[in-house]
Amino acid sequence: MLVIALSALAGALVFPLSALGRTSLLSVSKEWLLTLVGFWLVLTFWGLFYSMLLRSHLGLSRERALLWAALCHVPLLLCLSLVAALYSSDSANYAYAVGPYRLVYQPIAMAYVLAAPAMAEALLLAAYRWRTVAAWLPLATILLVALVLRAWNLGWALPALFHSDENHYVGEAFTILGNRDLNPHYFDNPSLAIYLDYLLILVLSPHVQAFHAAAHLFSLGLLDPRGDYLVDIAARAVSAGAGALTVVGVYAAGRDLFNRRSGLLAAVLLAVAFLHVSDSHYAINDVLATFLLTISFVSAVRIYTRGRATDYLLAGLFGGLAVSAKYNMGFFPAAILVAHALRLRSERISFRSMRHQVPLLAAGLASITGFVAGTPYSVLDFPSFVAGFRTQLGYGARPWDGQEAGIPLLMYLSTLLHGYGLAPLALSAVGVLLAARRHPARTALVLVIPVTYLLFMSTQQLFFVRFAITVLPFIAIPAGYAIDRISRRAASPRWAAAAACATLALAVVQPLSLSLRHDLLLGRVDTRALAAAWIDANVPEESTIAVETYSQMDGRYGWPTGKLRGTSSFRIKDDQGMMELLKAGFDYVVVSNYGPEPWQHDAGAHGLLGPYSQLDEAGQLAARFGPGAGGADVPYSADDDMCTPFRNLGVRERPGPTIWIYRLARVSGTASLP
């Protein structure tokens, strides 16, 4: 107990030294002393409570429990070296208490005081409960792989926000902060993601200075002209974390529907799924909404397997939150209804029994609560909400600018073949057939959401590859089941395990290689950043620049260069528009092969087409930056969505479009667009 008390005292000294600075025994203030005593008591009781935990859960004797608790607190004695340094060196004390890096040193020291004993205690419990740890180790490993794939190069392109939808959420959150009005006045998308970003702003804004100090101390070379880098990367981290946790949801659903191994195999397939990995790098709503939908589905599965009231409430609540993140998650009630019906059928209860419909009503009320909690102004500003929802619904009637109309289901199939994988998709089909023979009710439950979703989306002309993310968790589950059933046909358990590993290895080759290639590309300089650097170095200060909107190189996307701030942006649709641009008097024009019109679909392979070809006649090509090997062009693909590449990864050397910078003949007058 004495060791615990002394170690706690050593750790407690860090807090008054960080908050109030160095003092002497003769001039110690009451506040300094109270801070020391308070944290000493907290750390001491922490150690004693841990010893009690060891006695009650592990059955250790009092002496042994106190010994282990004391050993876990011993790392706190290292804090005495910090105390000695601060009292023996004025320069060390200045750096820690006053210098610019105090915002880094002090949090690290205080975090050590809390983390060191906690980690030691966790390792001790793991050693005693190694069988439990071993049982959870496969899922923990899968979760770690999923998180690494989604967090790798998470700060891609910052401070620029190349995914235009990121500004719909982070930008709207800053607007709420600036206007001091919680009503986003934007309902084309629901509000949950906006409010999460707003919460991140409130929590992280006081720490921006410390973040910059840490970046400078560790020479990270971060550019943050708007001061929102920390919020931007945190918003992306929310997507990455939600994407990784979706893997856990898939495991839980697969385990409850079939068995543990099916759940683990399904979790592996989703963990490496290229489409899911790439979209988890964006601070948008798709991955977050899919995570919430998956958790709702897990609860729906448990409605069928055990039927507790909490299962109904959680299925409804998380389903409502999912819709509050993205409207097209609104098909979640299908799983609840099917699970409820299957539950009543298995217990031979009449569907006309009103008493047994009460849980279903509770799920409905919980879903409304979840949606309104995430989008409160759907009620408080109902007319604006209805108008925004109708606008969003109207987008589905036609393809987006630059997209060609196609058969929706074939576009989803093409996306899944590339973004999920040929082998995984084949295994999903096999799994559905196998499960339908042995477990028809469970198969119906796992298919109801993706089938309903795809049936509705097949009526919509608007398509982006991210729309297919919604179905990934649900098709991964039967794929995991298929691998499990195929491997069990082996002659012995050893061969069954080998067959499962071999089948899984073949299934993950394509998605894992694409995910790794994608993440590697994100760590390389984007063509737009290369173009911006060239403009900084070569364009005179007094020059005027016009930037094509779809190149995303104007000031709205957070470029650090002053020469790209305040530039005019344009979108050319015909020859007349190009003629007006050329007569506007700009010195430089920046264009890309991400333009919206059909004539640019092959621009990457053949140069500028359509009205853009006039630039070759009216000006001189000053610079060109291509994303292929050696700066070569890469064919335009609407699937790239102007953010990170989805197609043609193998021929890319870096992300971004092909950028052309033209120097035009100066026309008298002020440069402006009509």
Image (spheres, helix red, strand yellow):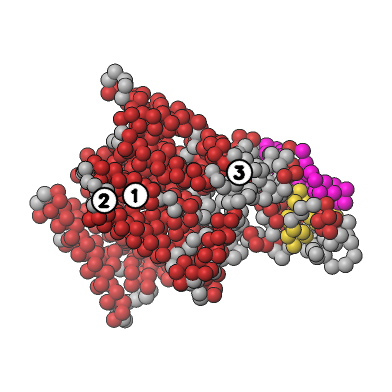
Q: Are marks 3 and 1 in contact (CB under 8 Å)?
A: no
Out of 182 and 567, give the one closest to the viewer. Answer: 182
Q: Position of residue 579 (x, y in %)?
A: 85, 55
Give the total of numbered labels: 3
Mark 2 or 3, which is nearer the eye?
2
User: Where residue 102 is drawn, which disc sits there?
Assistant: none
- The kind of residue tagged 3 is Asp
Q: Residue at x 40, y 43 (%)?
A: 448
Which residue lies under the disc numbered 2? 352
Q: Position of residue 21 (x, y in %)?
A: 38, 74
Q: Residue furthest front?
A: 352
Q: Quadrant of the N terminus?
A: bottom left
- Residue 639 belongs to the span the image colors magenta: no
- Residue 626 belongs to the span the image colors magenta: yes
Q: Residue at x 37, y 63 (%)?
A: 369
Out of 170 and 595, give the one closest to the viewer. Answer: 595
Which residue lies under the disc numbered 3? 639
Q: CA distance from mark 2 to mark 3?
A: 48 Å
Which residue lies under the disc numbered 1? 336
Q: Is residue 306 left or right of residue 58?
A: right
**Could you classify mark 2 by the number of other residues whose Cα lies within 10 Å: few (under 14), some (14-19), or many (20 or more)?**
few
Q: Is residue 226 left or right of residue 456?
A: right
Q: Is residue 611 above or below residue 413?
A: below
Q: CA distance from mark 3 to mark 1?
A: 33 Å
What is the span of residues highlighted in magenta in the rendered image?
606-634
Q: Quadrant of the C terminus?
A: bottom right
Let me know if residue 625 appears in the view. Answer: no
